[in-house]
Image (cartoon, rainbow, N blue to C red):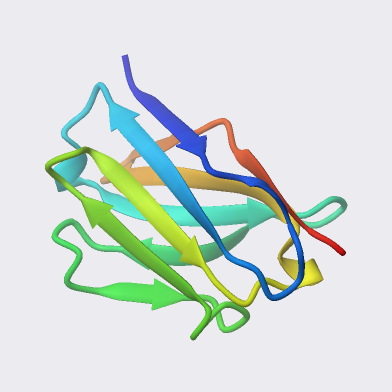
Amino acid sequence: QVQLVESGGGLVQPGGSLRLSCAASGFTFSTYVMNWYRQAPGKERELVATITRTGGYTNYADSVKGRFTISRDNAKNTLYLQMNSLKPEDTAVYYCSAVFGNANYWGQGTQVTVSS
């Protein structure tokens, strides 16, 4: 049974930091490209960051470049998103996804709220 379980969300003040985790099980994590997406109220889901199977290549949305860092630990079957210098516009539900060919799995999401 495939599972992606996000954690680490919460309420943080502008300028603060959070580290999201995504624990994977039920599939061979190291063979999947992993992504973080987010969806704010009333907006479409947007791709935030991508990391390749070995972590050798990463890509970011322009809105988070220089502030967010995606990483993975294949030994622990876990994906991470380090978020620094958070802004109110980063408020959203954050989802991890796993992609391999036609397979695309999603987690249930974790809420991040940036507010003073």
Nearer to me, 17 or 105: 17
Nearer to me, 70 or 40: 70
Q: Is residue 94 above or below residue 14?
A: above
Q: Is residue 86 left or right of residue 23?
A: right
Q: Position of residue 58 (x, y in %)?
A: 31, 73
Give the residue displayed 22% in from the left and 28% down from the top: 27
| Quadrant housing the N terminus | top left
Give the residue displayed 41% in from the left and 31% down from the top: 4
Q: Is residue 102 above or below residue 39?
A: above
Q: Is residue 106 left or right of residue 26?
A: right
Number of marks: 0
Q: Position of residue 89 (x, y in %)?
A: 78, 69
Q: Is residue 41 above or below residue 49?
A: above
Q: Quadrant of residue 109?
A: top right
Q: Is residue 76 left or right of residue 46?
A: left
| Quadrant housing the C terminus | bottom right
Q: Position of residue 29 (x, y in %)?
A: 20, 39
Q: Is residue 57 left or right of residue 2?
A: left
Q: Position of residue 59 (x, y in %)?
A: 38, 75
Give the residue displayed 84% in from the left and 62% down from the top: 115
Q: Quadrant of residue 54?
A: bottom left
